Amino acid sequence: MEPFPYFRDYTVATRAMVFWLPPSGETGALLDEILSEVRPTTPYAGWFSNDVAGEWGGVDRASQHAVEVVPADYYMNATVHAGVQARISDRVRPVPRTSLRNRVYLTLTVGEGDNIQYCQRRMRQIWDDPARGRVPTNWTVSPLLADVGPALLAYYQRTATGNDLLIAGPSGAGYTYPGSWPQGDLDAYTALTGRFLRRTGMDLVYAYNHRNAAGDGWVAFDERIAASYRKNTPLRGVIQSWETGDLRAAPPGCR
């Protein structure tokens, strides 16, 4: 394994605790112990080992301890980007007035936006494609960029066409599985999400939830989760999906 220094300056500047623990086995137990000692909505900034399995296990463990994940291990010059001031718009995009007809509607949503290093690098490459703006597209970004990279978010807001809509990446103010959160702490996450959505003018979120007991599928939001988003955020809708291509309809009572 090669050490990488990309996020090191921000870690030092914030005097954050540093640890690298695969989220399974004995190291997973130690990870649980550390996460259980922090306050709800304390961010885990970095990433996990073991590729996708590490992602699912790590994010789920963090969620069980009321901790959201900020994928940031390759986020470069974070102290500079967090310190540069930029005017972020809190203007909500007006909803076009249209009458729905009995036909199939296609929605294109670009994922990965919960990952602030993606917002910094790969997203910019895709964004610069001259074909961007020809068709309506949702672009997931992290509303946390309002703090850790305001100039990045301001650039996307400023250069978006009428066909580009910025929406919050999974599952709001940080990558998490709301269904795994302790019941008494979920409102803290959705309240945090609500504050950042209002700062950034976003009113849609692309959301994940925890995997089922068999580990071969995902669980849709229940009314408890929907009610927490409804109470604490300005969202007008939730796109709940995952890599298999499945799309779940909103549960009863969710806007």
Image (spheres, rainbow, N blue to C red):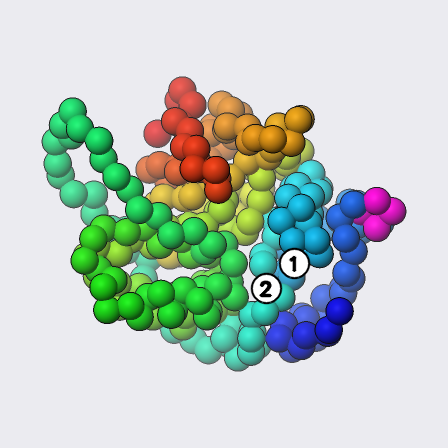
Determine whether, in the image, residue 138 is placed left or right of residue 34.
left
Give the residue type that dot 2 points to: Ala
Do the numbered discs 2 and 1 sit on residues whose CB atoms are within 8 Å? yes
Determine whether, in the image, residue 56 is placed left or right of residue 169.
right
Which element type, helix, strand or loop, lies under badge 1? loop
Q: Please tell me whether the stretch drawn in magenta is mainly helix, strand or loop.
A: helix
Determine whether, in the image, residue 2 is placed left or right of residue 149.
right
Using the image as rendered, state which of residue 191 and residue 225 is in the foreground.
Answer: 225
- Crowdedness near tag 2: few (<14), some (14–19) or many (≥20) residues, C-alpha within 10 Å: some
Question: Which residue is under mark 2?
Answer: 72
Give the residue type that dot 1 points to: Trp
Using the image as rendered, state which of residue 37 and residue 110 is in the foreground.
Answer: 110
Residue 7 visible within the image: yes
x, y percent for residue 102: 16, 24
Q: What range of the chain is rendered magenta?
A: 25-29
Please, is residue 69 above or below residue 57 in the view?
below
Determine whether, in the image, residue 255 is placed left or right of residue 22.
left
Using the image as rendered, state which of residue 56 and residue 64 is in the foreground.
Answer: 56
Question: Which residue is under mark 1?
Answer: 47
Which element type, helix, strand or loop, lies under badge 2? loop
x, y percent for residue 52: 62, 49
Could you say which quadrant of the image residue 206 lies in? top left
11 in magenta = no
x, y percent for residue 196: 45, 53
Residue 183 visible within the image: no
